[in-house]
Every structure is written in C-alpha cells, then in structure tokens.
Amino acid sequence: MVRALRDEKANEIVYEVDDSLFTGAYIVPPIYLKSPRFDGLDAAMAAKCSWPETAEHLVILAMPDLSKEEFYVHFPFKFQMAESKLQVNQVAKWPLMIYLHGSGGGTFMSFAKRNEHRNEGCRFAAEHFIIVSPSCKWGWKNPPLPWVLTLVRELCKLPYVDSSRVYLTGVSMGGMGCWELGMQDPGLFAAVAPIAAYHKSHLRSEIAEALKSTPIFAVHSHKDATCPLSKEKFLYEELQRVRALLRVDLCNHSHTDMHKPHMEDPTIFEWMLSHPYTPKVPVATPIRRWGSKSALWAMGRFG
C-alpha cells in the first residue's frame, strides 16, 4: 500500500497499492470496519497480576470512522480467559466498573498507587470488578464524548462481562460525566456514583428524570471550593423531588482529596454490587446526611 485516500464526498477510504504485476498503481475498493474493534485487549486479558500490583493495560478502541480512542483496563486477580472458543460460554462473568477521571487525568489504579497505605477499598474493587478507565479528552465545561457509551456497549458484548452489573463512577469532571452519560443512556448502568461532581443547571431536570430509577451514590464535601456543595444540592433536591433512588454521603475532604472515598473502604463498591440492573419502580428514598465515618445516619432534608 502506497497511501490511504479519503473521499470526502462519498465518505469512503480507498487505498493506493503498488503491485509489481502491473505498471503504475491502482485503487482498490474501500475497506470498512463494520463495528468497533479492540486493539490490545487480548494481551491485557492474558497478563497476570496479583496484589499489590495494580497493573493496567492500554487498549485502543478503533471506530468504524477510523478514529481511535484510548482506555485502560484492569482485570480481577482471579480472572480467567477462555482457552478455546468452546470454553467461551463457560467463563465467569464479572461486574464492570467504568471510572471517569477529573480534568487532571489519571486512571482508577493510578489514584490507588498514591494511597497504598489506605487501599482496602481499592483492593476490594481490584478483586471484584473489571475496571475500565477511559481517557476523557474533553474540557471542564464540555459534554463527555459519546464514544464512551459506545465503549461500554461493546464491552457488554464480551462473554466475561456481566451486562446486568455495569457501574459508572468518576471524580470532579468525571462526576459530571456520570450525570450526563447516565442521563444519555440510563438503562445501560445498574448504578452510578458521582464523586465531587458538578452539573450544568440547564440539564438538571433532564438528569433527574432520566436517572430517577437508577440507584445513585453521590459523595461530596462540605469543604469543596472547586465544585461547591451549595450548587450540587439543587440537583440532589431535584432527584429527591422525582423520588430517585439516591444516597448522599458528606465528608470534609478538600476537592483534590475527593478520590479518597473510592479507596478508604469497600463501602461504595459493596453498594454497587448490591444493585444489579433490573427494571425498577421508583420509590420514595430520603436523602441521607453523613457527617463522618463514625457518625450515625441522619434522616431528613438535605442541607
């Protein structure tokens, strides 16, 4: 192949080939990807790791339009891939957790490495979930790119993914991504967990309506000056108005330390696993206030 040429009018890719059997070169018919393709996923599955290793592997999602998107994947320590096509239907199915990073980048496991002395929660997640961390190449005020939903749908087709237990979580900008991606396809996720999140006020009612039947575990801080609780509480109240399945935990971390609720203990991950996807009937669930790890749950109005 000498070069690839894009026909903008026909929206096709054609390839110029130099063939010694002919003089000059000729154009062969365009080659298409009928569906997205994973590059590097088989190698990631075959790699073995054990605690305290937190190995993640870069995988490329090649799209039919020839664009390529990056994500990192961590497989559970006891993950076993099928050794033959005959064994595909016999492999264990694992819960899938999608982690969306903040504007500073990173992956779920990269945050875990910063907190190795307090990684009980991370260890639980690493043992119980396939963890996928997309490279979120959008801005603080921009909507999350739709390829992430394509990624999740394609992962759900894999024989070792339990499509009834797909969970979405993220910090800061990633928390905003939880609200908006969850809003766009609420039936895709068994539950969502935005951490130190923010939302766009013009989408508030749409988010609440879309997610009113999806279990939500939100974590926020009284001391968050970057994504103030005073603004996020309006979405919590809207979710409460539509009788959403909402739990809110409040802490006193700074915004840059808000990844710690992912790591300190397994609470949020155990909560995820308690919510497999089933058609849900909304029920009245009051927002709960949690002042500290040792505090008792207090029922009543959020404030």
Image (cartoon, grey):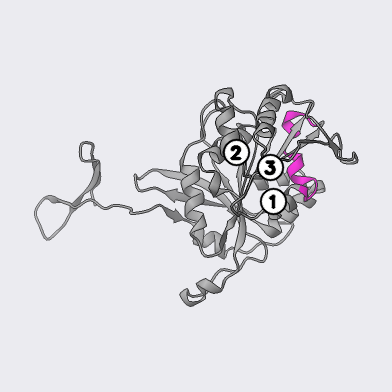
Residues at marks 2 and 3, CA–CA distance in whole angstroms: 15 Å
Q: Is residue 130 above or below residue 215?
A: below
Residue 253, above or below 192? above
Quarter assignment of residue 81: bottom right
- C-alpha gap between disc 1 and disc 3: 13 Å
Q: Look at the image and tell me in which quarter the C terminus lies.
A: top right
Which numbered mark, 2 or 3, is in the foreground of this view? 3
Secondary structure under the numbered disc 3 in the rendered image: loop
Identify the image quadrant of residue 124: bottom right
Q: Is residue 172 magenta?
A: no
Please name the residue shown 58% across and 48% down the image: 189
- Say which of 105 and 202 sits in front: 202
Q: Secondary structure at mark 2?
A: helix
Q: Amino acid at mark 3?
A: Leu
Q: Which mark is residue 245?
A: 3
Tell me which amino acid carries mark 1: Met
| Label 1: few (<14), some (14–19) or many (≥20) C-alpha neighbours in 10 Å | many
Q: Residue at x 53, y 28 (%)?
A: 139
- Of the image marks 1 and 3, the number of the one nearer the N terminus: 3
Tell whether label 2 touches label 1 (CB within 8 Å).
Answer: no
Pinpoint residue 91: horizontal percent, then vertical percent.
57, 71
Q: Which residues are magenta?
A: 253-267
The mark closer to the camera, 1 or 3, is 3
Q: Secondary structure at mark 1?
A: helix
Which class describes the residues within 10 Å of circle 3: few (<14), some (14-19), or many (20+)? many
Taking the image as shown, residue 241 lies to the left or right of residue 60, namely right
Amino acid residing under circle 2: Cys
Q: Which mark is residue 178?
A: 2
Q: Residue furthest bottom?
A: 86
Q: Which residue is mark 1?
A: 272
